Amino acid sequence: MTVTPVRPGEYRVEHDDRQDIVYHAEHGDTQWAFWNGQVFREERRREEPEKTATRPAATTGPQRLMAPMPATVIKVLVSKGQKVRKGDTVVLLEAMKMELPVRALADGTVAAVNCQEGDLVQPDQVLIEL
């Protein structure tokens, strides 16, 4: 695997005959990596040297799609009652000069839209419920 910096917070990762772009951001003790529509968050704990990472929620049952980091809602691409498929982008966010698509983790129907264009959102704020 080869990791090449593209610009601050953006890396090209070459592996298994493919190339992916991975975005990285950090604020205080929290770091985020954004890859292939998924967000990984890691918090450094001062009292413990071991780190833990959170992964996206399970893809069965109701889904609560949340903001991965402090961001601005650029575009809401779905409305209540709309059917979505796994991988569909439902909200487009901007954070630290990066565009972050929030994608459905499984097929479903939009039950609630809890944000609108221009909103400033915080980590773990529920944006869309499926």
Image (cartoon, grey):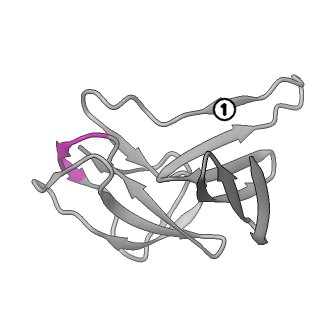
Left or right side of 2 for 118? left
Q: Is residue 14 or residue 71 the one in the foreground?
A: 14
- Residue at point 74%, 65% (across, down): 9
- Residue at point 59%, 60% (across, down): 70
Occupied quadrant, residue 20: bottom right
- Residue at point 55%, 56% (across, down): 122
Where is residue 38 shown, x and y percent of the image? 50, 47
Occupied quadrant, residue 48: top right
- Helix, strand or loop at label 1? It is strand
Return the residue found at the far left: 81
Which amino acid does the dot numbered 1 rest on?
A: Ala
Where is residue 94 shown, x and y percent of the image? 53, 71
Query: What is the tally of numbered marks visible in this picture?
Result: 1
> Would you place residue 108 above or below residue 117 in this image?
above
- Mark 1 crowdedness (10 Å alpha carbons): few <14, some 14-19, many ≥20: few
Where is residue 114 shown, x and y percent of the image? 31, 56
Left or right side of 59 for 37? right
Where is residue 55 shown, x and y percent of the image? 54, 34
Left or right side of 12 for 66? left
Left or right side of 79 for 76? right
Q: Is residue 30 or residue 58 the one in the foreground?
A: 58
Q: Is residue 48 magenta?
A: no
User: Which residue is tagged 1?
Assistant: 53
- Residue at point 37%, 53% (across, down): 103
Image quadrant occupied by the C terminus: top left
The magenta segment: 106-112
> Would you place residue 76 above or below residue 125 in this image?
below
> Would you place residue 61 above or below residue 90 in this image?
above
